[in-house]
Amino acid sequence: MMSFLGLGLLPDLGLAGAGEPLRFGLTPIFLQERHALISELRAYLERKLQRPVSFQVRDSSHGILELMQRQQLDVAWLCDCPYVTTHPEFRLLATPWFQGRPYYQAYLIVHGQDIKTRGMADLKGKVFAYTDAYSNVGYLTPRYLVRQLGEEPNGFHRRTFFTRSPRKSIEAVAEGVADAAAVNSYIWETLQLQSPALTGMTRVAGRLAEFGFPPLVAHQTLSEKDFQSLRQVLLGMARDPAGQILLRQMNLDGFGDPSPAYYRNAEEMVRRMQDGRDAGL
């Protein structure tokens, strides 16, 4: 059950050491090229927390993960695959809710004119676009599906390449540079609202596994007071008028209590692929 704190306007909450910025890491995956929205989110958090907030954006999950591991970030919005492989280092802070649930689906997409492809088995010998090697849906899931077919991921497709972002994977399929890609349903559905001409050039050929929505995590070194204050702000956004505006812009329902159970599917898939000694892990 989703738990949002606050019954109206959430009061501003100060964190310990108000002069020190809260260092928040993002990849382009969730707020792609939406610099104005990132700026508005930062201003909202600064107002609620009464302290500076510094957003650091990197072009890959690996870049953000490295900053977190070096203790150069306090908080990050991580893909679920990096979270399940490193979670002893981090604390679950909050899980976004999308379309009423703390989950998303893996979408297998092909060009809109491709009316034959129904699943991964139809893509043998085709060109496939991966997102990056730290992406669950954009890399691990399609390789897992190939392995489930009894095939080796490295030789199944005629050619593969990395795009570095889900949007670029969608563009690659739309433009015919790739025959197919696997993308996060949240990304595809959000782009369908923002750029319907782009998603309209693709077709969802398969709705694959469901996974816990990529979480917000905090480094273990973040103080308990800071952790709880930020958590309260995030969970209260759905009850705060200004927070509701930001959530609508992000196409999210809100942020809810996190649970490790949300990420068991991804964790199990990582384990199975590691047992199979997949070269990508």
Image (spheres, helix red, strand yellow):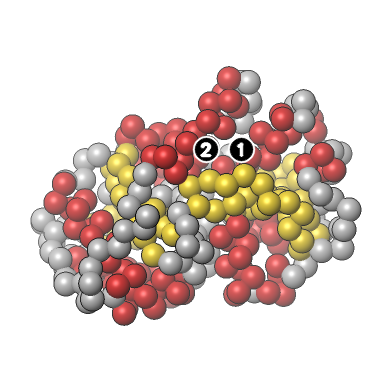
Farthest residue, direction front: 1
Kindly identify the amino acid type of the residue bearing the numbered disc 2: Ala
Q: How many marks?
A: 2
Q: Is residue 271 left or right of residue 64?
A: right
Corner quadrant of residue 171: bottom right
Q: Residue 55: x, y in percent?
A: 35, 60
Name the foreground residue: 100 vs 252: 100
Q: Which of 209 and 81 lies nearest the eye of the viewer?
A: 209
* Numbered mark located on residue 266 in the image: 2
- Disc 1 residue crowd, few under 14, some 14–19, many 20+, Cα 10 Å: many
Q: Where is mark 1, residue-wise?
A: 140
Q: Nearer the viewer, mark 2 or mark 1?
A: 2
- Residue type highlighted by circle 1: Leu
| Residue 73 in sight | no
Quarter of the image that includes the N terminus: bottom left
Q: Is the residue under label 1 in contact with that under label 2 (CB below 8 Å)?
A: yes
Residue shown at 63% from the left, 62% from the top: 188
